[in-house]
Image: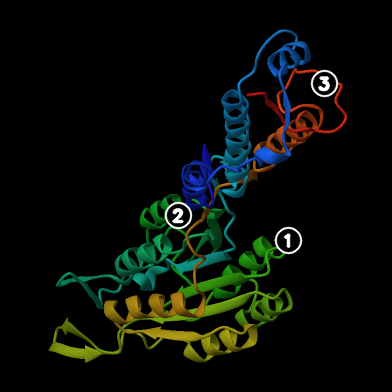
Amino acid sequence: MISLAWPWVLVLFPIPWIVRRVAKPVKHLEESSLRVPFFQEIMRIETGGQTIQKETISSRRFWFGVVIWALLLLAAARPLWIGDPVALPVSGRDLMMAVDISGSMEIPDFTLQGEQVNRLMVVKKVAGEFIQRRHGDRIGLVLFGAQAYVQTPLTFDRDTVQAMLTESEIGLAGKETAIGDAIGLVVKRLKDQSHENRVLILLTDGANTSGDIRPIQAAKLAAEQGIRIYTIGVGADHMEVSSFFGNRMVNPSKDLDEDTLKTIAELTGGVYLRAKDSMQLDDVYRQLDRLEPAAQEAELFRPTDELYSWPLGFGLLLSVLMVLGLIRIPVFGARSSVSKPVSISPAV
């Protein structure tokens, strides 16, 4: 569509009409006129037999000037051609999420909406909400137990990543925990990516008990590739269980290797975060939002082209034509052989 950048300029349009109404016409001095008894005959000869009234000449000049004035005002108002909206690219991150689905994730030491649930169910809910907040990021999902595998490659489709996380089941990758293999698999996926912001969020509730790569060794490889790793340790410190001798308190997170998780984070420039219940886990992911801010929503840009040159060009062209016409004779199309204007009045 066409729009005006400075439409207020058009309020100046009535100025020629106001000047015409207010300003007094120029009076010709009668004593300087040459009185000729055959004035009308001379005018007929000069105009090819047509008598042109002064009022007609003045009116034509006025309206010709009005057209030029309107074109100049239109050019000054800066007409713009505004194109269709174009989405600007957003600058996000390549973010991989590694989630532990080993057998220990089945421990029901978390609560969700007042019900006792296992750790993975809470992770699905809280991490799923985190995924939906990551506008502009390419997100991938790695699940690991005794083995690690890519559940979802890097993608902008957050709904698919969340759905694949929701469909994950405990024990699919084995009952043990291969933290080192999970990190190594992510490094393999991210090392060939040109994006500068490459992040791994690793969530586990235990210690490395399986795999071919030691966690510290894998963390050093990640550090060499410039990949930041944020580690999350999940699991309650206290849990009441029933036994033959009655209820007793146990520590369901006794196998959590916090020292290794802290070292992994420190080696790669990340942070270790601890979540002992569902509320703390939600706080952990919101803290990750602050540590690694998501890209802003895509902004729309409407390309514009300046059109002022068209009315300006036509206005200048008409001005030149008008000036050339006034040099020859006050009325376009009239022919004159008089070299200098002489004020001639009919004889009384």
Residue at position x 69%, y 40% in the image: 31
Q: Is residue 342 above or below residue 107?
A: above
Residue 138 marker: none
Using the image as rendered, state which of residue 106 and residue 58 is in the foreground.
58
Q: Amino acid under label 2?
A: Arg
Q: Where does residue 301 sit, x and y in percent of width and height?
A: 55, 51
For the question of whether residue 103 can be seen, the reply is yes
Residue 158 marker: 2
Q: Amino acid under label 3?
A: Ser
**Gap between marks 3 and 2 measured at Cα:** 82 Å
Residue at position x 65%, y 43% in the image: 308
Using the image as rendered, state which of residue 156 and residue 211 is in the foreground.
156
Residue 336 marker: 3
Please identify the quarter of the rendering in which residue 42 is found.
top right
Q: Where does residue 195 sit, x and y in percent of width and height?
A: 68, 64
**Residue at the spot of label 1:** 192
For the question of whether residue 256 can be seen, the reply is no
Colour style of the rendered protein structure: rainbow
Residue that extends furthest to the top in the rendered view of this protein: 49
Disc 3 on helix, strand or loop?
loop
